[in-house]
Each structure stands twice: as C-alpha cells, then as structure tokens.
Amino acid sequence: MENVIQALKEKLAEEQISTNQTIKELHSKDETYHQTSLPDLVVFPKSTEDVSHIMKVAQRFKTPVTPFGVGSSLEGHVIPYQNGITVDFSLMNKVLEIKEGDLLVKVQPGVTREQLNKELKKYGLFFSVDPGANATLGGMAATNASGTTTVKYGVMRDQVRDMEVVLADGSVIHTGNLAAKSASGYHLNGLFVGSEGTLGYFTELTLQVYGIPEHIVAARATFTSLTNAIQAVTSILHAGIPIARVEFVDEASIMQLNKFSGTNYPVKPTLFLEFHGNEAGLQADVAFTKEIMEDHECDNFTSESDNAARNHLWEARHNLAYAYIHDYVGKKMMLTDVAVPISELANSVIYARGELDKLNIPGGLLGHVGDGNFHSLIMIDMNNEEELKKAKQFNEKVVRYALARGGTCTGEHGVGVGKKPYQREEHGAALDVMIQIKKALDPNNILNPTKIVDID
Amino acid sequence: MENVIQALKEKLAEEQISTNQTIKELHSKDETYHQTSLPDLVVFPKSTEDVSHIMKVAQRFKTPVTPFGVGSSLEGHVIPYQNGITVDFSLMNKVLEIKEGDLLVKVQPGVTREQLNKELKKYGLFFSVDPGANATLGGMAATNASGTTTVKYGVMRDQVRDMEVVLADGSVIHTGNLAAKSASGYHLNGLFVGSEGTLGYFTELTLQVYGIPEHIVAARATFTSLTNAIQAVTSILHAGIPIARVEFVDEASIMQLNKFSGTNYPVKPTLFLEFHGNEAGLQADVAFTKEIMEDHECDNFTSESDNAARNHLWEARHNLAYAYIHDYVGKKMMLTDVAVPISELANSVIYARGELDKLNIPGGLLGHVGDGNFHSLIMIDMNNEEELKKAKQFNEKVVRYALARGGTCTGEHGVGVGKKPYQREEHGAALDVMIQIKKALDPNNILNPTKIVDID
C-alpha cells in the first residue's frame, strides 16, 4: 500500500489520507449483521479532481475502491471485502446551488437528506425521498433508496436529473441534463443510480425538489387483522386516491414503538397515512379513505392536520428501527426487503409473519405497503450461530416467496452482498447483460468489487 | 440476401417474409422529412421465438435489422439506412393479460395505444402516455415517448415494469419484475427503454396503468402575449398544482387549427389544460389556476367538465399536426423537439418564434410546456433545396440554444438519425459510455445501425 499512498499524496494533502485503526474500523461495517472487513486506508476527497486522482491511482495499482457516505447502508455495500481504499465523501458535503425557479438543487454526494431539507425549507421546498435514516444523497443515489413517500413522489432514481460521475479510469461524465424529460441517448441517470459504486462514483447530483404541500393531513388506522389492513391499502390504490404515505406496522412493532416512544397506540395491525394537496381536496380524500377502511374492518381512524401532532405520529413511526435496536443491546439487525405485486401483498405479509413466528427471534413487520414493499425486522444474537443460520434461512424463504410471485429480492435497500445470492434467480440471463456492462465500464473490477455480482 | 431468406425460412412461414416492392417502400420512411431507404426484405414475426430466430440469422450473416411498428416515428428511427431486414411487429399485436388487481397490463409490442385504451376502458382503467399519434407500445418504449399527460403521469420509461427483450445473439431476457419498485441490480428497464432498437428488440411489455380519474376538468386560456402564457405555466408549476396536461399553442397554430377543425378559438397564444382528481379538489385547483393566469394577463379562461366538450377541445389540439399536413399537400413536416429547464422556457420559445419568423416557411409553435418541452412545426417543400437547408439550420439553432442552457436536443421524439449530430455536444464523454454499452451488447452492430451513434 505504500506505493498507493505515495501516488495519492501527489495530489492529496496528508490529512486527506488515513491509516488510523479507529478510522479504518469505522469504515469496516454498516448498520446490520454483515461481516466486517477493514480497508487498508481511508481517503477524504474534497473535490471532483481529488476523486478523479484517487481513481487513476487505484486503476494504476489495481487497488479496490469502496465508497462511503455515513454508513447507514443495510446490505454491506460500504464494507471493503477486498480491503484497498475506502473513499469517504464526508468532506464533499456542500449544497452547491438551489435553482428555485427550476425546482432543482445541485449537491455534493456527502450532503445528508436532513441537511438538504433544512436548506430547502427556507425556500418553501422539500426533497421527497425519505428512507428513515439520515443518509447521504450520494449513498441514496447509489442504492436507489426510497421510503415512506415513494407511493406519491417516486424513488431516488425518479428525482435525479443529472449526476457528475467519475469513471473507473478517472474520467468525468455527466449522466443527464436539467430538462424535466429527455429522449436523448441511453438513460445513464437510470443506469448509474442503483449501481452501488460498481460503475462510477458520484461527485455532484442535480435533484428535483417539490414545493411544500399547501395542506397535509396525517392519519392512523387500526384493524381487526393484518389481512384487513393490507387489503384496505389495495382498495385505496385501486380507488386512485393520491395518497402521499401509507405505512403498515404490525402488532409486535406497535408494542416496541409504544415502549420506546412513550405512545399508547392500540396494539393492533396499524396503518400510518399522509395526504398532500389543497384543503378541499384532502377533506374528500380523507373521507373516502375512511369509508374504504371501514369496509375492511378498521376499528379506529384518527386524522391530524395540526403540524405538531403530525410530526409526533411520524416520529414514532420513523423511530421504529431504533426502538428495536435500543431494546436489544448487543444484538444485530437483519431486515428483509422484498417487494411484490400489490395483489400478492396480503398473502406475502401473512406468510412472512407466520415464518417469523416459528423462529423464536424477536422481530416485527413493517412496510411501505403502497409500493408492495415490506420489511421483517429481526434482532439477532451474532454469538449464536444457530440463530444467525435460522435468520438467514428466514430471509431466504421470504425472498423466494416474493420471486416466485413476480416480485423482487430488494425493494429499496439494494443488493450489496446480502442480496447477491439471489441475483441469478431474480434476473436470469439478464444478469449476464449486467455483467457485460460492468466489464465494459470497469474492466479491472476495482469499483466496489464483490457487490451486486461477482466478476471472474 | 438469398442465404438469409433461406435461413429465415427454416422457422418462418413463406408469408412471414416479403420482398415485395410496395411492402419495402412502406418500410422505407417515417412521417417526416428524413431521406428514405429500402430494406432488402421485411419479416413479420408472430412470436418471441420468431424474433429470436430472425436475430440469430441476422447475427450469422451480419445483416442489419431494423424494427418497425406503425412508422409514426419522427427522427428516422425506422428507416433502414443499411438496408437488410426490417422486422415489422404488426402481427404481434395482442393484449396478453390485464392484471386489474395490480394495475398492470401485459402486451405484445405491436399493440397500439388506442387499441390498448379501448381494452382498458372496460375495466375503468387507462394507459397514460399520449404522444398524439396512434403509435405502437413497442415503438413508444423504443423512443421513450411521452406527450400531453407527462407533467402528471411521467414518460414511457416510468410506465414500464418489465420487458421481454431479444438480444443481438437471439437470447431472451426480462428487464424487470412486477413489483412497483426495485433496487435489485442495474436498471435494465431504463436502459432498454429509449434505446431505439439498438440494444435489443422488445417482444412483451408489462406496463403500469391507472384508474380513470373520478373527475376531469379541461380548460382553455388565452393570453395577451406568448411570454405571459409561458410564465403562467411556470407559476402553476411552482404553486404545486397537480395539473394533468398543459399545452401551449401559438397564434399561427391556432389559425391552422381553426381552419382544420372548424373551431373559432381566438387567435392568441393559448394554453389547453386538464385537471384530474376529486370534484372538490379540482374546483379549488381550477380556481387557483384561473387566479394565477389572470395575474399573467390571461384575457379568457373557459373550463369544461362535460365529457363531449372536453373531448372536442382535446381533439382540436391533437389534430394540430394533421391540420398542417392537410393544408400543405406535398410538403414534408419537420418538428424541433428541445426541452429546457422551466426557467429558460419563456425565452426559448420567444427565440424559436423569432427565428421561425425569419425563415418565411409556414409553421407554428406548440408544446408540452409543463415539461419544458416544445416543438416548432414547419412544413418544407422537399424539392426546394434552399428551404430544406434553411429548415435544418433553424433546427440546429434551436437545439444549440437549448443545449447551451442545460436542456436536451430531444424531449420525446428520440435521436434516430435526426438528432445524432448533436449527441457529442449534448453528452460529451458520456457518449463514450453509451458506445461502450452498445459495443458490449451488439458487437457486430447489427441492431438498427446508424441510429443514436455511429459505431466504427
């Protein structure tokens, strides 16, 4: 590595390169159960030129490079399994430009979601993608993150107008333009978003933002059964009500949430909802939603348009993962992440709950059910090999169930190493197309190797 | 070609292969001014297996293959400039499955937009992308078509959940799955949509559809100037009003439209609008829109919720291209198609109108201004070399103006041969990434060669 460090120092300052053990350990893991692995060194670029230089050095020495935002990833994306250089984007954290008139913002990849929204609020704007964690926007683009608002505003890929990307040879490209749509050439925005650092590193992102809605209503609805709750969602979607969020939380998770957040929500299958629009329209939407829910044995429906009450409700929902982590100190989190066609959702959730009950491991179900995407969250004792094995088998069962019904192994967390074993099963011969693209753009396989697919 | 025909006959019936001159001529052109070129033969596959066989034969003999829907393309995409085999998808025109519960439909590529909507109507559903022409869905996916409803429902790429694609070697892949979102692997749906037959041929498409809105209001607004009309649109977008269509038509085009459709709309810069939602919400949206328009010197605002009146209004708008074609018999149509960031739209339209006025060629401006996308439609006498040259220079000026302002050379018509000269200017080094992908997936360059980029 001495050669690599020497070459990096040609353009980077001393303090931008670290081999400190604590720093390396911070970059050896993500937020979940995946095995850790140390980088040989961590670099902190400050500019596109720095990233380009790092890439050229990595290419010269055929050293693996792994990107790192805040490490909130869930499938091992940021763990450098072949060691080498970890590129930490925390010093590239500027909101470069807010183009209010175009509803666009240009940011560096290390800007976090909350940091951006704080800036945008001054202009009456907001960034729509909300995965829960305060992830970096570079990381969210790398994994095609989504979350609670996707049912209305779309996934991360839908928000990206343009990215500046440093390729494996250090050259710099732009993947799009600033117009709202384009039919010019291959869709590189779409290809690079979700490529998990395996095709190039993002150094600037131009993202679409929205005006803060005129009127917002949040609601909470409880049901007599899980099936009723999910079927109510299906009916809302069919009715074409333009719902902005619709989140399912099962009984086990409501208990956990009450314990952590001090709420006393009824311990029942629950939907958390949100509506955005004008006041008259929302009144009609909420009334229609309530009617549909009552057809599905909803026994309690509470709506809130007051700002503080709405925030309280969503804060409780957003703290759910931490509610589990907080209560099971020393255990590691595993999250399944399948998405299925809406018609398969109720049965998929019932199946997952049934399999989870057999495990005797603490956990619950929650999900962005408007997109057919749900998570089983389970807390694993990593010193208990039997438990880890059972948890992995459970994950596998849920994935196979979804794939057999036209679904996907990951709705929003990405592949990383955790979903790599299912790539062939999900994509079939299309995986070879992905491999051809990877080989064409990264012939020496230095860009986040071992992620998405293994390259010979 | 005799060898090729012999090989094709191994699996195709006699009547699926044509070398008839009339048939070849029908496949030698699109709807615009681009130079014609004849295929050597036209084949009519009936199944994925047929397409796969055609591709294997083409690969064996290194014969170019060009796809063909109904020929409504506007940038020469379907014209076989290297002759060879044209693959006409008109026999693959079945709606295979309507998955009502999932709001999905599976179709063959030769199904047209109107054919699909006729089927969907029985279920209270509709397909959102409306480019005006009754194009095939395969062709619309190949060019990433969009149109009047894009401002609310998105472009063709946004509707594609999965496609079955035959690759250059005859192998068959699926590009997606049936879930509403996915973070699994590279975004092949996005890559193949808009690839204009240069990466593979679509044999099945699974598309997202929507419930017909509860309530629809259409409106027409006239303005004292073009600038006021465009600035009104910008203000509507900023206000976050969820408008479903917003179309600009300039004075010259209103005159043409009145003449063709027998309407007597005031000859002024005009917006045609549409709103979808619940009745109470729409009343508020329309009232707010009217208020914004009046701030921008709108001198007449008429809204219609009656079905027949709405249809009449949109029919007039949709017939606009035909209104020109009908009136200039023997002339050919050229359409510019830039899209720019919203803040640049008013100036871009004024610039285009000014340049058009200098030409002394009949034409007008119209556009999907909610997306920053507008067209200058001009009618050219192809026997007048001077006129063709002037028209091409005009097109070039409008494109350069848009590119210099962060826009794109084509918002929705695609590249074909017409926008190929601007690909390097628009994409810079990113064009090399596109070329690398093309070479990886079509090493012998048999798939619609000469389109998007020239490959050595």
Image: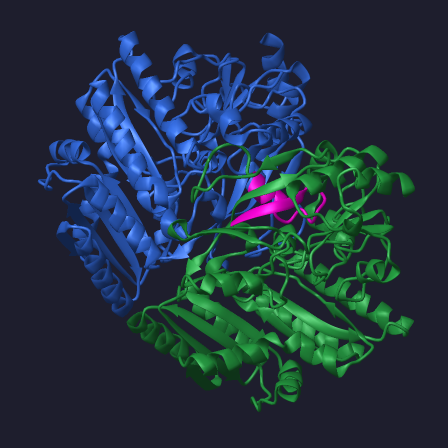
Chain colours: A green, B blue
> In which quadrant will I find the N terminus of chain B?
top right
Tell how many labels. 0
Q: What residue span does the magenta drawing correspond to? A: A188-206
* Residue B119 seen in the current view: no
Measured as percent of width and height from the top left, residue A141 is found at: 61, 52
Q: Quadrant of the C terminus of chain B?
A: top right
Residue A332 lies, with reference to residue A421, above or below; the image says below
Residue sitting at the far front = A14
In the drawing, does residue B213 fall left or right of residue B354?
A: right
Q: Nearer the viewer, residue A230 or B9?
A: A230
Residue A362, horizontal then vertical, whole percent: 76, 80
Q: Nearer the viewer, residue B200 or A303?
A: A303
Q: Residue at x 61, y 89 (%)?
A: A262
Q: Is residue B202 above or below residue A100?
A: above
> Quick one: A192 or A404, which is closer to the camera?
A192
Whether residue B30 sits left or right of residue B227 in the image: it is: right
A204 in the magenta segment: yes
Question: Is residue B416 on the magenta stretch?
Answer: no
Work out whether B175 lies above or below B17. Answer: below
